[in-house]
Image (tube, rainbow, N blue to C red):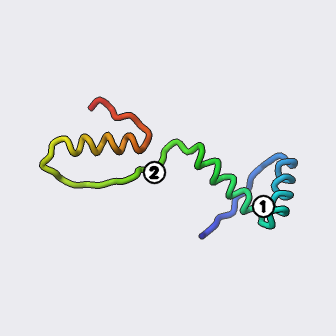
Amino acid sequence: MATRRTTILADPDLLDRVERFASRARTTKTAVIAAALESYLAEHDEEPAVAFLAVGQSGHGRLSLDGRRIVHREAGRRPSGR
């Protein structure tokens, strides 16, 4: 996995805790911070990934309307009145 470098500003006590935890877990501070970011984003991300996406044509008139409702439901949004 490709990585990029960044700089964060954090309370010195928090950074000390991260360092102690990484030492006890025999891992790096980078791994601890990356795991914490992944966990936070997984819990707080507002737009979940769409479960599926398809394009097609059907002779069944309601199929596209039902598909749109499913996509909106899977994405956590309510369909508009269109």
Circle 2 residues within 10 Å: few <14, some 14–19, many ≥20: few
Q: Residue lying at the far top in this picture: please name it.
A: 81
Residue 32 in the image: state x and y as whole percent: 74, 58
Amino acid tagged 2: Ala
The answer to whether 80 appears left or right of 14 in the picture is left
Q: Compared with residue 35, is residue 61 higher up or lower down, i.e. above or below?
A: above
Q: Quadrant of residue 55?
A: bottom left
Disc number at residue 29? Answer: 1
CA distance for labels 2 and 1: 29 Å
Q: Residue at x 16, y 51 (%)?
A: 58
Circle 1 residues within 10 Å: few <14, some 14–19, many ≥20: some
Residue identifier under label 2: 49
The quadrant in which the N terminus is found is bottom right
Disc number at residue 53? Answer: none
Residue 40 in the image: state x and y as whole percent: 64, 47
Amino acid tagged 1: Lys
Residue 60 in the image: state x and y as whole percent: 15, 46
Q: In this orientation, which residue lies closer to the viewer: 28 or 24?
A: 24
Q: In this orientation, which residue lies closer to the viewer: 17 or 10?
A: 17
Secondary structure type for disc 1: helix
Q: Residue at x 49, y 44 (%)?
A: 47
The quadrant in which the C terminus is found is top left
The answer to whether 53 appears left or right of 15 in the picture is left
Total residue callouts: 2
Secondary structure type for disc 2: loop
Q: Quadrant of residue 65?
A: top left
Residue 69 in the image: state x and y as whole percent: 32, 40
